[in-house]
Image (tube, rainbow, N blue to C red):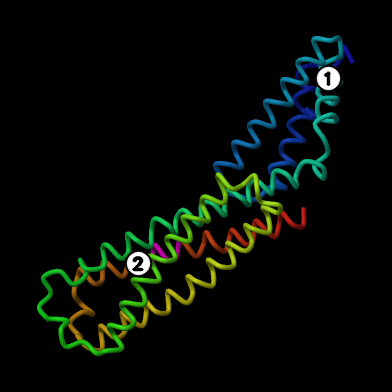
């Protein structure tokens, strides 16, 4: 192996091939995934350097480092489970922060409007109260879920299943809650047609749509990554 050139070593680098395969097999939050891949590469390089210092040829040292690190089938499940948990935590954290913010900013949609809301229908106020109270309740539950992913992680027997339940729960809640919000907006336009062109209302709807849309995307990914971890 002493005749192997640096160019040949680079072309057939077992570590690069292994890390590329690991990156292709993992799905999850990009930043966490990239950190995992970088950490795995550093561990492999350090191990290869140690084997080379012990007398192995460079290519043999890198091959042994890869062999002792474990096959993709052996290491991917643990990595994917961690990525799923991170996605679950991110989803719950976003819901815990975004829902209260949406409700706190909601009155600004009607700020200085040329119409009053005193003559609104009973159904309108029922839906508004339902949206507000369930938002804060869901935010508190999401906060407990975040605690489950952090401080309570050691007590979870199946973190992947927990993540999947969180994702499914979030998808269901956001769908139903979004319908209530849409109903409130529809009744607003019906009762006060001028609201359809009132800038604060339009800005608020764009903000709410983006917040709910992003939360929904996180929740769907939560379910997807948990499923991938279960199948790994």
Q: Quadrant of residue 113?
A: bottom left
Q: Residues within 10 Å of mark 1 (few under 14, many from 20)?
A: many
Give the secondary structure at mark 1: helix
Span of residues in magenta: 207-214
Query: Residue 53 location, x and y as percent?
Result: 80, 9
Task: Name the N-terminal-most of marks 2 and 1.
Answer: 1
> Is 184 rendered above or below residue 73?
below
- Crowding at dot 2, Cα within 10 Å, few <14 / some 14-19 / many 20+, comes out as many
Looking at the image, which is closer to me, 57 or 67? 67
> Of helix, strand and loop, which one carries label 2?
helix
Give the CA separation, mark 2 to mark 1.
Answer: 55 Å
Q: Which residue, given by chain and number where applicable, does mark 2 sit on?
A: 208
Near-viewer residue (214 or 131)? 131
Give the image location of residue 206, x and y in percent: 32, 67
Residue 169 location, quadrant: bottom right
**Where is 216 relative to 160, above or below?**
below
In the image, residue 77 lies at what x, y percent? 75, 47
């Amino acid at each position: 192996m002493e005749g192997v050139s640096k160019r040949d070593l680079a072309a057939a680098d077992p570590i690069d091939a292994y890390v590329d395969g690991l990156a292709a097999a993992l799905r999850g939050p990009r930043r966490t995934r990239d950190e995992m891949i970088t950490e795995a590469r550093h561990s492999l390089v350090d191990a290869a350097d140690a084997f080379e210092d012990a007398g192995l040829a460079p290519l043999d040292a890198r091959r042994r480092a890869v062999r002792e690190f474990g096959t993709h089938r052996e290491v991917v499940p643990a990595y994917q489970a961690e990525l799923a948990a991170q996605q679950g935590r991110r989803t719950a954290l976003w819901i815990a922060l975004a829902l209260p913010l949406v409700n706190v900013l909601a009155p600004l949609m009607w700020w200085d409007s040329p119409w009053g809301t005193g003559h609104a229908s009973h159904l309108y106020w029922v839906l508004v109260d339902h949206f507000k109270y369930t938002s804060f309740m869901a935010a508190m539950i999401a906060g407990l879920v975040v605690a489950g992913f952090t401080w309570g992680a050691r007590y979870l027997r199946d973190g992947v299943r927990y993540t999947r339940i969180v994702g499914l729960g979030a998808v269901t809640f956001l769908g139903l809650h979004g319908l209530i919000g849409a109903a409130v907006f529809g009744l607003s336009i019906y009762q006060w047609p001028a609201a359809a062109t009132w800038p604060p209302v339009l800005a608020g709807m764009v903000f709410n749509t983006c917040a709910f849309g992003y939360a929904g995307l996180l929740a769907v990914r939560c379910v997807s990554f948990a499923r991938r971890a279960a199948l790994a």
